[in-house]
């Protein structure tokens, strides 16, 4: 007090006022700073206490205040993530943990453990929802979608999410998920195969070929070669399709599908000799396939091997009595063998069936 009076005796009035104002302002700033710091620490401390007391709503309220007041406080985000997990709000858990890890590596171990814990729970919920006769694909999708946010690097959830999306008709979403998996794990040929089939079914042939060829970079695969050949056939690339099927046959010589499709390819290019040998092999492998037997009969006709074609067509007319095409070809072969009455009857039958 004495020093103040001594100062006032010598200092001009204006200086005295400025000094008092400055001191008062400093007090306000200091007090405001201490007050704000007290609120931030109090909110975080209160949130942690409420978690211990299992008062989750109050805990979350305080922790949301804490991260709002101190957005760069990694612990505040970590604790908010914890309470979100306890409340089952896994999307917000993922966001809070992401932010905490952006700010600091101090909580990485704990966050990794908790992410895996919650991911396992959510993933299993998704599997249960997608399984059985009462499968609920919408619910399963919600679980898998949450799981990929909680632990993005666990690709199983991504695969299941894509599979569910495909079943729900969300083709673009399914492909986006599979593309994410393949980008993270290029060696995952199963995913590339699935993508190829989806592209093929959607008539997106260039992307289908790229997917199948991605698989074949890791080794020959019988089923993939067949699907590649089908894609090439749909694109009108007969030579490439033939080569793919021959590669598939090198892996499985007794493949009905390969021989049948090769027969069709050779027939389309009027290579009837090779068409016949492949259709004969297809019929030998699968005698009950009516399409293979019909194609073989037509190939015999093209080669003028009527004695071989006739029994096939006659048996087909018994097994496919309402197939006008069979009756038409049977009428044709009867005419060629001078069985006029039989030919007229067969043609009449074909006409009655729209042929």
Image (spheres, rainbow, N blue to C red):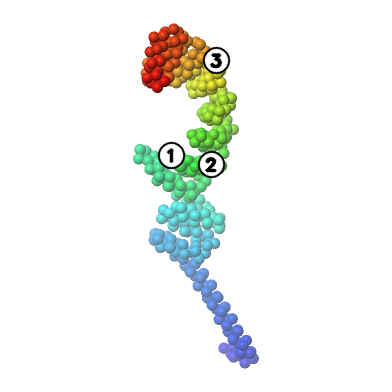
First-in-chain label (1 vs 2): 1
Q: Is residue 45 above or below residue 184?
A: below
**Can you identify the residue that label 1 sits on?**
167
Q: Residues within 10 Å of mark 2 (few under 14, many from 20)?
A: some
**Can you identify the residue that label 3 sits on?**
273
Residue 179, disc: 2
Q: Is residue 131 visible?
A: yes
Q: Nearer the viewer, residue 208 or 62?
A: 208
Q: Position of residue 267 (x, y in %)?
A: 53, 19
Q: Identify the residue at image location x=49%, y=55%.
A: 95
Q: Is residue 251 above or below residue 168?
A: above
Q: Quadrant of residue 273?
A: top right
Q: Identify the residue at image location x=56%, y=42%.
A: 183
Residue 258, disc: none
Locate the N terminus by quadrant: bottom right
Q: Residues within 10 Å of mark 3 (few under 14, many from 20)?
A: some
Q: Identify the residue at image location x=49%, y=36%.
A: 202
Q: Residues within 10 Å of mark 1 (few under 14, many from 20)?
A: few
Tag 2 secondary structure: helix
Q: Position of residue 152 (x, y in %)?
A: 51, 47
């Amino acid at each position: 007090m004495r020093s103040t009076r001594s100062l006032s005796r010598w200092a001009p009035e204006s200086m005295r006022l400025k000094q008092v104002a400055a001191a008062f302002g400093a007090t306000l700033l200091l007090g405001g700073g201490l007050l704000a710091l007290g609120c931030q620490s109090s909110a975080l401390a209160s949130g942690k206490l409420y978690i211990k007391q299992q008062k989750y709503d109050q805990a979350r309220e305080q922790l949301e205040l804490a991260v709002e007041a101190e957005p760069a406080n990694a612990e505040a985000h970590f604790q908010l993530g914890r309470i979100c997990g306890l409340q089952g709000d896994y999307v917000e858990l993922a966001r809070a943990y992401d932010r905490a890890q952006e700010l600091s590596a101090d909580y990485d171990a704990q966050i990794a453990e908790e992410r895996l814990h919650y991911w396992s729970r959510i993933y299993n919920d998704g599997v249960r929802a997608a399984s059985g006769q009462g499968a609920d694909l919408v619910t399963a999708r919600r679980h898998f979608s949450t799981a990929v946010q909680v632990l993005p690097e666990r690709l199983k959830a991504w695969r299941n999410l894509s599979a569910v999306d495909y079943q729900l008709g969300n083709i673009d979403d399914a492909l986006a998920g599979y593309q994410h998996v393949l980008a993270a794990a290029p060696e995952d040929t199963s995913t590339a195969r699935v993508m190829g089939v989806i592209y093929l079914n959607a008539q997106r042939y260039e992307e289908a070929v790229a997917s199948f060829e991605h698989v074949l970079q890791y080794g020959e695969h019988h089923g993939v070669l067949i699907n590649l050949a089908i894609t090439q056939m749909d694109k009108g690339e007969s030579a490439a399709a033939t080569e793919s099927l021959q590669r598939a046959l090198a892996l499985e010589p007794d493949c009905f599908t390969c021989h049948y499709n090769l027969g069709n390819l050779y027939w389309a290019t009027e290579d009837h000799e090779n068409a016949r040998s492949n259709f004969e092999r297809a019929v030998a492998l699968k005698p009950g396939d009516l399409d293979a037997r019909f194609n073989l009969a037509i190939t015999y006709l093209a080669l003028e091997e009527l004695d071989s074609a006739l029994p096939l067509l006659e048996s087909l007319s018994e097994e496919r009595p309402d197939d006008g095409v069979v009756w038409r070809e049977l009428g044709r072969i009867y005419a060629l063998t001078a069985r006029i009455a039989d030919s007229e009857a067969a043609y009449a039958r074909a006409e009655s069936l729209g042929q």
